[in-house]
Amino acid sequence: MQLAASTVPPAGFNFSSKSEMSRLTRYLVGLFWSNALLFAGVATVLIWLIQCLRVFDVVSVKGQSIFTLVGQAVLSMPPLLIVFLYVCLGIGMGRALRDLQLSQELHAIHSSRRLGALFGAVGVFIGLGAMLLLLLTNVVEPMAQRRLSEWQASIAADLVGRTLRPHRFSEVTPGVVIVIGGRQGVGEITDFFVDDSRDPAMRRTYIAKSANVSQDENGYVLNLREGYLQYTTDKLAFSQITFGSYDVSLDRLTDPVVDRDPLAESSSFDIIRDGLSTGVWSQNAIQMLINRSAEGLRIVGICLLVASLAAFPTGKRLRFVLPLEASVLAAAFGERLVTTYVPGMFAPYAGAVVMIVVGLVILAYKLRINQWFGGVPKRAEMRA
């Protein structure tokens, strides 16, 4: 007598050799990626449209072209992609496993004892996803942020240059008014006046006898000469600083004051190379590398958790079943919550480690490790 499998593998699945197992792994990896990329593509388009609306002032206020709008929206996408991409990968893999269960293919894989191919596909998917996310975090995001800062500086220079008309008050951006007395020479401005009232707590007024626009390693700079800087607080306290020469970044006159972070605009390879060449590793540089590497660990955690929940077929009919997408989102929010409130340098790893531990515990329970290695009969012993 021979024990028959409870489920017959569907047509097209022949698990008789290692080559067929590798074919099954490739099939599953392709299925995982097709679902994940479909979901990520839809989310990317929606978020890109939101970013276009957010930076629409480059067209409506700053007078730039539609191509500038599109480019600015694209360059602002990498930080958002890093936040939601690992969630999309987890949901994509979960949807693929759910489709396999609905089509009975997952039952066939288990009944044919090809869990090695299944979890091999999960491992390959995790590895590729982690590589993609680490590439975005360590290389693409710093490059995009540096290019975005440079682009914004050039827009600021263009905006100020177009709005500077002699004896005419011009509002270059809400709250910033500029007027000049005239122009002379090459780019020389006379009788320069700027009033910046964007900050309710501190009003700044720049007055200079002459000025010109130049560019240095940090972007476009407005060089003021022979003038003074006035501060007026919301309590009507007044102070004045006289200067012979004073440099003002044009970003400060056209956008909210945000200091550029050289580390955030440097790739991880540049940070590591600088540290090895100088032998000095700052606390901020180490923390930046830890934060970026933690993104890859999140992929491992969320995919292991999804595999532990969806990689095993079940015949139970429950009255209420929590959708897998909701479970992934809940895990992502929980991971961020743990990461936020755990103190210490390695806090970015905390949430991912929790997901990995929970996923491994569930997998160990479902696989029943003792039976898997000791209690499961071999094929030769299944014949009576």
Image: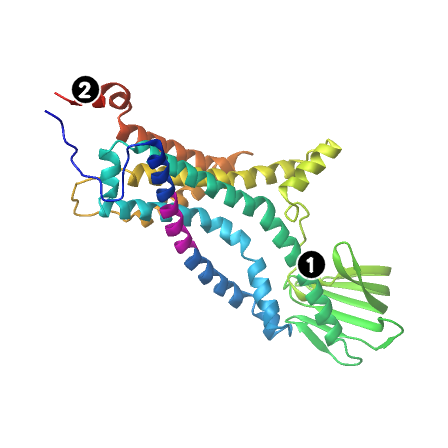
Q: Position of residue 288 (x, y in %)?
A: 60, 40
* Residue occupying image coordinates x 29% and y 41%: 310
Q: Is residue 101 visible?
A: yes
Q: Residue at x 25, y 43 (%)?
A: 105
**For the stretch drawn in magenta, what is the main secondary structure?**
helix
- Residue 72 sits above or below residue 110 on the image: below
Residue 150 lies, in percent from the top left, at: 69, 59
Residue identifier under label 2: 381
Q: Nearer the viewer, mark 2 or mark 1?
A: 2
Total numbered labels: 2
Left or right of 101, for residue 350:
right
Mark 2: which secondary structure? helix
- In the rendered structure, the answer to whether residue 188 lies left or right of residue 289 reads right
Question: Which quadrant holds residue 314?
Answer: top left
Q: Position of residue 74 (x, y in %)?
A: 56, 60
Toward the viewer: 9 or 330?
Answer: 9
Visible residue check, residue 327: no
Say which amino acid is labelled 2.
Glu
The answer for how far apart the CA atoms under marks 2 and 1 are is 70 Å
**Residue located farthest toward the left when viewing the structure as drawn:** 1
State which quadrant residue 197 falls in. Answer: bottom right
The reply, left or right, for residue 83 in relation to residue 75 is: left
User: Of residues 162 and 373, which is closer to you in this image?
Assistant: 373
Residue at which label 1 appears: 150
**Is 33 included in the stretch rendered in magenta?**
yes
Magenta region: 29-40
